[in-house]
Amino acid sequence: MQHIIDRFISYITIDTQSDSSSETTPSTQKQWNLANKLVDELRAIGLSEVTIDENAYIMATLPSNVDHEVPTIGFISHFDTSPDFSGTNVNPQIIRNYDGKDIVLNKEENIILPSSYFDDLLQYIGQTIITTDGTTLLGADDKAGITEIVTAMEYLVNNPEIKHGTIRIGFTPDEEIGRGAHKFDVEKFGAEWAYTMDGSQIGELEYENFNAAGAKITIKGKSVHPGYAKGKMVNALLIANKIISDLPKHEIPEETSGREGFFHVNHFNGEIENATVELIIRDHDLKHFEQRKQLVKDIVQKYNNVYDNCIELELKDQYFNMKEKVEPVFHIIETAKKAMEDIGIKPIIKPIRGGTDGSQLSYMGLPCPNIFAGGHNFHGKYEYVPVESMQKAVEVIVRICELTANQ
């Protein structure tokens, strides 16, 4: 277990935040620091065909050790962390034999991880939990997944009596800004299917995700002295507010769960002459997803009719529900499910209220459901991961490799 802790900490203490405003791949130069370290480590543990391309996509191979034909499968994780919260100077805390009480993250700033509010903590009484120090995110999303894949491959290299086919692994940049699969070479990867190790709590197995789009609404107003503005001023801020108010009031992230879709306004700024509203649109059902996009178009057109076409809408699809691509090869879900059950884990099969590299890769020809990596409360200071969950994820990977070779 200490080996997993040491490896995980060596990854999370390297800042790899991505940046959606950047046009490069990877979007931040600092992602190369971990990428290059991973390449060295993969070679050191004995993998072959270790490559890193000009965009920092990493691939490697564990060759088959059986003499019969076995499908080539893959495991994928991303090494960037979310730009939503600082990933600089991550200072992890290790809580051994967790007692179920509130965890003090930062005594000086009185930052607490309360078990009464984050009650998932109570599943892990008696276990070892790694937390933040309250000033950064942790980076378990998805450096826990990377830790698990590397550790599983190392275990298979060191235990050749465990039979497996050819295993491909891939590590990607920029997943947190929606670009993780954009330059992933599926043909070069060469797997029949793969799994992203990018889920949350132990047992998660996911093959459904949101259909996703992003909208940017730009309003051009007219500024006139307010004392003489009647019939002349066009206040872009007020128009933006009207547009937001016309969205369904209860179809927001704070009030939805399961397969319920939402509109989420995540950026709003401006002044009288210029205002910008950015929002994301999410729904598991494709028909409802299209209706949501149409509603945004209709609202914009409504106010363009009133305000002389002063509003511009940029609406882009981001990714789609992988269910359509995974269901025809559902045996890959059954294999993961059996692997979990074989090591005493109860599978939690549920839709992802988000997306992974796997959702895009599935539409690129690589069916790619998602397996737990163990972390909780991603993208913020309350993030934590139980070490035992990471250990179990390693065992799931190993067991999937075994099952695939024996089918």
Image (cartoon, rainbow, N blue to C red):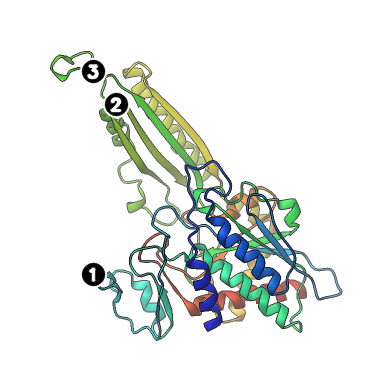
Q: How far across and how far down the image is residue 379, in percent? A: 41, 59
* Label 3: which secondary element: loop
- Residue type highlighted by circle 3: Met
**Residue 119 in the image: above or below residue 36:** below
View extreme (right): residue: 67
Q: How far across and how far down the image is residue 3, in percent? A: 56, 81
Q: Residue at x 33, y 81 (%)?
A: 100
Q: Is any atom of residue 207 visible in this view?
A: no
Instruction: Give left or right: position of 400 versus 272.
Output: right
Q: Nearer the viewer, mark 1 or mark 2?
A: 1
- Residue type highlighted by circle 2: Ala
Residue carrying label 3: 233
**Mark before the other along the chain sequence, 1 or 3:** 1
Q: Nearer the viewer, residue 45 or 250?
A: 45
* Label 1: which secondary element: loop
- Residue density around tag 2, few if under 14, some if 14–19, many if 20 or more, within 10 Å: many
Label pair 1/3, CB-CB below 8 angstroms: no
Residue carrying label 1: 110
Q: Is any atom of residue 141 visible in this view?
A: yes
